[in-house]
Amino acid sequence: MHIHLSPSGLLCAIFMTSPAFSVQVKAQANQYPVSAITDSLLTDANSVVRLYTTEIQVKDPQNATAHYHEVYTVLNKKADDNLTFTSYNSSFRSLTDAHIKVYNKEGVLIQHYDKKDLMSTSFGAELVDDGSFTYFKVSPPSYPVTVEFDYKVKYKGILQYPVFDMQSEDQSVEKSSYQISIPTALGFRYKNINTKIKPSKTSAGALTTYHWEVRNLTAITLEHASGPAFQYLPMVLMAADKFSMDDYAGKMDSWAHFGDWVVALNKKDAALKPDQIAFYQSLTAGGSSPEAKARIIYDYLQRNMRYVSIQLGIGSWKPLPAAFVSTKKYGDCKALSHFMQAALGAVGIESFPALINADRPNWPVEPDFPGNYFNHEVLCIPHLNGNNDTTWLECTSKLLDFGTLGYETAGNYALLLTPAGGKLIQAPPSTFKQNILNISDQIQLHSDGSAIQQTSFAGMGAYKDLFLYGFYQQPDRDKKDFISDYMGLKSTDSIQINEQPKQPGPYCFDLLLKYDHYPDFTSGNKLFVSSRPFSRFIHTPDQDSTRSADYYFPFPYTMRDTTVYLLDQGLHPESIPDPSKQSFDFGQYSSQYSYDATSRKLTIISQLVINQDIIKAKQYQDLVDFAGKVAGDIEEKIVFLKE
């Protein structure tokens, strides 16, 4: 289902089950029978768009209405998202009418609901909000099932026009159309993504109407780890050069003008009070350089400020005043970034807020098509130490280090908000030199098969992010699940976790594991043991000679593992595996094995480097071969003999 969210894109849909008061209806003339779907549209499809129409009427920059009519046949449970209706309501967007109908596979109407039957909820206690979600989840009696959503929305200003996203993954289309009537003077424009479709265009007085229509689109199945779906699915981006939100008029005919509008929203509230300026100057008096002062203020922000999402009025765009944030100690991503900018300015450090996506974006940011495709704000400090580098600060996080962005934010397009307007740039990408995981294992193996394992993890960059958000200060059960799921921890009889404090540099933690029976299996006087205790060294891609999409790793990385086996008297390795060395332009792997008979110590040192996160499709077979050889070495069995 095409879910319509708030203009800021910062909020998530809520999926709930349908109410108990579902309305049963008498059978009527059949509509949308599954038997009417052609075989070509059923191939590789989990759902079929039977009908999807969008009709938007724009009166002026502050007033518009839209009528959405959506009919989906859900063929199986994999497409259950299409059974959920949700509409975000705020002071700028309101659901005025809604009807939901449910049909069985014969196309017989079996249930219907009106707007009064739908449920509504405001957001959680962490949010300051004047909006709500209206939602409904159809519970299908069986599959296939067809749902029809027919609803109308009133807008008080549109910053971002709905995208004509024709189909989702594994979804075919019988008929889909998009029509918009808009004052010619607003400067409407569009851009095709993965499609060559052209609209019909008519003019009547001051209005111009654009109409797109597609029929009989077969399902598109995305290959595993192929990156953002927008790289493959057809869509048309929409925008207008002129807009207005809450009587704040702006232009989006260039990134510079769009940035001007965002900057103007904060212009009157950007300054700190004199006593606050004096406070931050005193706080940083011991800083010996601009970077030292910036680190002191960032540490103060992380220790004292609290993130609260602000969606009140135009709050999804206009930040709280910097002086207010300094006093009250809370704000959303915009408010905290603008506060940090003001605090840095108090000590003579220039910085600029930047609009960005906090994760991999759902919609493309096109350099030649200015639009609002951002959902987050961070801060950029140019030339912090007099060089040409930029320093980026994530002002909502209490966990990330100074000068780092989350690995899903790094490398994304960002709109830098400068006094000269907006400037579209790319945030620094995450690199294998930053994302480093060091694992050190010492395993004391006894002749009866019992063992004690001491393991230390030290994560930097993206690994530090993963550990801080998935492991740090979590309950022990969640920590165990994280290690087991992420690193492939061998089943253990006892585990103790020693978590070290968060501090600059690597995030570290230690494990103490005890096993009554450590070997994978035994045969006679032979103990067969995996060479490394953790199996998730590299994911092995599926063999696929027909792959056409690039392969995406979550991030480039360096992983180092040192495993030491300390053997009991009476145990020794039957043989030592040969060293391994593999190299491609996208990655390298090496391992070496050594045994000291005097100390009865077997040492295995491995290093894997994936130096780029996107592997071109033409190199996919090389990646499969590389990963297979790495996995083969990692999964090598060591045979220990009992004397």
Image (spheres, rainbow, N blue to C red):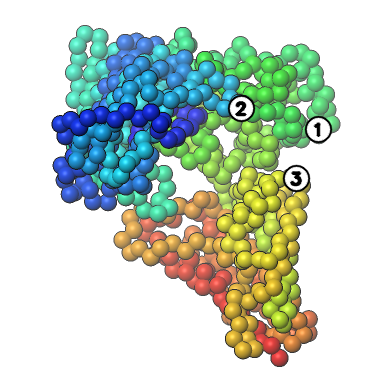
Q: Mark 1 points at which residue?
A: 287
Q: Mark 2 points at which residue?
A: 126
Image location (x, y in percent) of residue 135: 42, 28
Image location (x, y in percent) of residue 586: 49, 59
Q: Which residue is drawn at 71% across and 64% down?
A: 494
Relative horizontal placement of residue 429, taking residue 50 as reference (left or right): right
What's the amino acid at mark 1?
Gly
Front residue (pair 369, 491): 491
Image location (x, y in percent) of residue 392: 62, 36
Quadrant position of residue 639: bottom right
Q: Is residue 56 above or below residue 106?
A: above
- The label number, if any, that marks residue 503 in the structure image: 3
Q: Residue at x 18, y 49 (%)?
A: 40
What's the amino acid at mark 3?
Gln
> Which of marks 1 and 2 precedes in the sequence?
2
Front residue (pair 485, 325): 485
Q: What is the crowding at mark 1: few (fewer than 14 residues within 10 Å), some, or many (at least 20)?
A: some
Q: Which residue is drawn at 73% across and 79% down?
A: 446
Relative horizontal placement of residue 537, taking residue 552 as reference (left or right): right
Quadrant position of residue 148: top left
Front residue (pair 366, 322): 322
Q: Specify the farthest residue to the bottom.
A: 643
Q: What is the crowding at mark 3: few (fewer than 14 residues within 10 Å), some, or many (at least 20)?
A: few
The quadrant the C terminus occupies is: bottom right
User: Judging from the image, what secondary structure is the residue with disc 3 in?
Assistant: loop
Mark 1 or 3: in front is 3
Q: What is the crowding at mark 2: few (fewer than 14 residues within 10 Å), some, or many (at least 20)?
A: few
Q: Residue at x 40, y 61 (%)?
A: 619
Q: In this view, does 575 lie above or below 368?
A: below
The quadrant the N terminus occupies is: top left
